[in-house]
Amino acid sequence: MKLAMVGAGYVGLVTAACFAEMGNEVTCVDADAARVEALEQGIIPIYEPGLEDYVRRNTQESRLFFTTDLAAAVQRSLIVFIAVGTPQDRDGSADLSMVLQVARDIGRHMDGYKVIVEKSTVPVGTAILVRQVIREELQARGEEIEFDVVSNPEFLKEGTALDDFMKPDRIVVGCDDVRVGELMKELYAPFVRTNHPVIIMDVVSAELTKYAANAFLATKISFINELANICSRTGANISMVRRGIGSDRRIGHLFLFPGLGYGGSCFPKDMQALIHTSRSRGYTPRILEAAEAINQDQRQLFFELISNYYGGDLRGKVFAIWGLSFKPQTDDIREAPALTIIEKLQAAGARLQAHDPEAMTATQKYLGNNQGISFAKTSYAALEGADALIICTEWTKFREPDFERMRSLMKSPVIFDGRNLYNPEKVEKLGFTYFYIGQKLS
């Protein structure tokens, strides 16, 4: 099929590359000419394992194209995906300005029947708005062209996005016409050969499904962090509790790891958007509000753990920071817990030496000319002369370090582990003072 993908950001680029990998002809549109030029040369603006190979291969084999010309892309395609950003607005709602602008542009340039697909994460009712602005543009042109609007939310995890797309648990399609549903089934048929379902539902339900999925997973993270805080006050072992409840098939182990909470581009924004949607319709979503509050509190509690160890005086202390991205296998620092910890430590007068396998460039750009933090090329270099190590992201390279080497580099063998990577007994036998999430309060 001939597809247009409007938006060459994370979702748009991954989706376009995967559709092209299956033999479709995909034209990826972005307003940023510099980004388009870089993509044409195989330069990827984000870090996602395997994505560079997909983009280069499909570009070279003339299945994947990049352009700033939206009109041409729309006119040559049957299905047009909208995959632009929906950032959080000041009131917590999703800002739909870019989505609706793309819809207007599609209405101005479409020259025949099109299926317009919402791939961006959008609140309930967005499809109605998209349909409305397209019709307005067609009326302004004096045209009567048939089109359909479909909701097709993405369920991609940063770090495993290609595998998630190529081998999905399910495909959700919201549409009002059975014929459009069959067309979307045909498009996704190569991805669901193992009998994972393509679930056809109404548009409103599809729009809500994306938010519901993210809200549930975010709540699961906050739930295990709540339990960790209870463990710290009762003496229970959070690792044992996690195993005990995660072994129940109704609960499962995924997203059930205590730590510094969730971050990234999806969970925080989508939780706020769903809370705003609920409140705007007269309902108070108490579970969602509690999950969000716990997530923010978790970072403060971790900072207090560090501060209390030093009697509340962090002035002049030097801390090594391992991990800056909000999760492993990405360079994404949006809403990353590490940034909150860095801000609080610096406000308390500490100096920082940070290392991350992929996110240091993004962090340097975010922090600007910040004299209180330096960036080390290796994890061990970050430890030199440090009063303590703070672990914020569970990159695999941090899981089995050389503890003897660590001790020799650090001023004091102290670890504050925000991701519970190590066995406490083992680390303490090696001579470290070790703090972790859920540890019994002394």
Image (cartoon, rainbow, N blue to C red):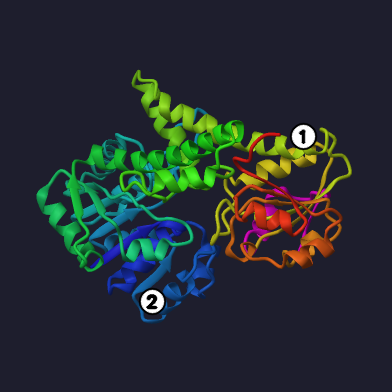
Which is in the foreground here, disc 1 or disc 2?
1
Residue furthest to the right in view is: 316
How many labels, in total? Answer: 2
Assign a secondary structure to mark 1. Answer: helix
Give SS at disc 2: helix
Residue type, mark 2 in image: Asn
Q: Is residue 262 visible?
A: no
**Residue 188 % position (x, y):** 23, 62
Q: Quadrant of residue 393?
A: bottom right
**The disc labelled 1 sits on which kind of residue?**
Asn
* Residue 146 point in image, percent of width and height: 16, 49
384 over 256 or under it: above or below: below
Pinpoint residue 268: horizontal percent, then vertical percent. 50, 39
Image quarter in which the C terminus is found = top right
From the viewer's perspective, tell me whether residue 249 is left or right of residue 188: right
Q: Residue furthest left?
A: 178
Residue 383 seen by the camera = yes
Q: Which residue is mark 1?
A: 308
**Disc number for residue 203:** none
| Residue at which label 2 appears | 58
Mark 1 → mark 2, Cα distance in angstroms: 54 Å
Is disc 1 surrounded by few (<14), some (14 to 19) or many (20+) residues within 10 Å?
few
Q: Earlier in the sequence, mark 1 or mark 2?
A: 2
| Residue nearer the viewer, 134 or 9 | 9
Q: Camera-side residue: 246 or 203?
A: 246
Camera-side residue of 330 and 18: 330
Q: Which residue lies at the image location 44% right of the left edge and 36% below the top edge?
A: 271
Q: List x then y, in percent, for residue 132.
A: 26, 37
* Residue 432 position by quadrant: bottom right
How crowded pointer 2 is (Cα within 10 Å; few <14, some 14-19, many 20+) is rated as many
Q: Is residue 126 magenta?
A: no
Instruction: Give the extent of the magenta segment.
Output: 357-376
